[in-house]
Image (cartoon, rainbow, N blue to C red):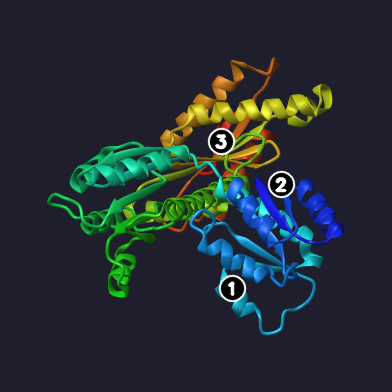
Amino acid sequence: MKVLVVESSRFHQIMISQIFNNEGLVVRIASNCDEAIAALENETMDFVCTAYHLPYGLDGIKLAQLIRTAPKTKDIPVILLTSNQIDNSFDHAYHSGVTEIYNRSNITTLSKDLKRSIQTKRHEINASVLFIEDSKTVAAMMTKQMESMKMVVEHFFSAAEALEKFKKSSIEYDIIITDLLVAGTLSGMGFVREIRKLIPDRSKLPILVISGFDDVTRRIELLNMGANDYIVKPIVKEELVARLSNLVTTKQLFDQVKIQQEQLYQLAMTDQLTGLYNRHSLVQLLPKYFSHSVRHSTPLSLLVLDIDHFKHINDDHGHTKGDNVLRKFGQLITANFRSEDLIARYGGEEFVVIMANSPHDDAIEKAEQLRTHIESHLIEGLKVTISIGVACADNNSNFELMFNQADTALYHAKDSGRNQTITFSSPEVVVQ
C-alpha cells in the first residue's frame, strides 16, 4: 500500500510519513512536481498526497492535472493538503483532477481514510456469481477479473439456460451479472424480469446489467425492471471491480444484519438454559393456536408441568446440577411431544405445553407417558418426578383462563402427593 507524499518541507515530510507509517502505509517522498512525476513513472502508487504550495511556481492542483493527463497515472487518486481554506479554488481543484481536499490538521483522519480506501480497492470478495455473457472475449476477461477477486463464477452463454439452472440450483448466489442483449429466446432484460419475479427483494440478490446503451431512458428502464446497477461497454476493469465490490459488499452486509436480527429474535424468544421457548414467546405465539382451534373447530389442550421438590435438588446438589436437570428435562419434553406442539419454560422449574388438535384423552395420555418416563429414568443421576395439570379449551377459552385451569389442576396434583397428572375438569380424580 504505497502513498506518494509530495511536500517541500522536510518537517512536514517526516511528520506525514510517521503518521502514514503508523497505519501500515508505505511512503515515498517527492519534494516537487518533477520528482513526483519521475517517481510515478518508476513505481506504482495507490495514492498521491500533495501539498497545495510547491516549489518552482507550481502547486498541487497543477500536479493533479499532470497526473490526470498521463495514461499510466490517470486513475491514481490525488489528495490535496492545505494549511488553510483556498478561497474560490475548490471547484478548480476538483475539475483539475483532485480527488479530495484535506486540511493538514486532519492528517491523522486522512491516514485512516487512505488505509480503508486501499483495503477496499484490493479487497478479496468471497462470492458466488451467476454470469451471462454470449461474447467469449468479454466473458473471458470478466471471468478472469472476478476470479482474481476470489469470486466463484458460473458462466452461461444463454439466459434461458441460466434461468433453468438458477431455479434448480441449491447455490445461494451473491450476485447476478447479465448482458442486456444475449443470443437466444430469452434476453437479458427478460432474464432480469424473471429473476425479480422469484426474488423481488434487491438486497437479497443484486443484479448488475452490462449494456451497450448509455442513454438516460434505457438506464431508467434497467433500474425500473429490477437491476441494482449497470455498467456500460466497453468495460473498464477498475469500474467493474468497484461496482462488483459495492454490490456484493452491500448484499453481504444485509445478510449479516438479517442473521443478527434472527439471532436477536432467538435471544428474545428462547430460554437460554433449555433452548425452549420462553414466557415472552409463549404470549406472542399462542394467539395463532387459539384462532386455529376456533376457526377449524379442533380441540386444544394445555399442560403445566412442574418438577417435584426441585428446590431440594438445588439445595442438596448445587445450582449447576439443578441447571443440568432443567436442561435435560427440556430435552425430554421435546422428545416426547410433536413438532407442532408449543413447548416453553414458563419460569423456574415450571413448563407449559400447548397441544394443537389434541382432545382431552390424548392430552392425558401424552402427559402420563412423559410422567412415567421421567419416573422410571434417572436425570443427571438423580431420581426425579413431575406433577402435571391439564386443561382443555372450550368456546370461551383463552390462554389466561386455560393456564389458570391447568395451574389449579397442578396445585391439586402437588397437594395430593405429587408425581401425578390431574385435569381441571375433575381435579379430584388422579389419572395413573
> Is the Cβ of the residue at disc 3 closer than 8 Å to that at disc 2?
no
Q: Amino acid at mark 3?
A: Ile
The residue labelled by disc 2 is 25
- The answer, for residue 432, to whether it is visible in the render is no
Mark 2 residue crowding within 10 angstroms, few (<14) / some (14–19) / many (20+): many
Characterize the local packing of mark 3: few (<14), some (14-19) or many (20 or more) Cα atoms within 10 angstroms.
Answer: many
Q: Is residue 332 left or right of residue 85?
A: left
Q: Looking at the picture, how far across and down is residue 272, in whole percent?
A: 65, 38
Residue drawn 52% across the image and 59% down it: 70
Q: Decide which of 275, 92 is in the foreground and name it.
A: 92
In which quadrant is the N terminus drawn? top right
Nearer-N-terminus badge (3/2): 2
- Identify the residue shown where x is 52% and y is 57%: 75
Under mark 2, the amino acid is Leu
Upstream in sequence: badge 1 or badge 2: 2
For residue 94, the mark is: 1
Residue type at mark 1? Tyr
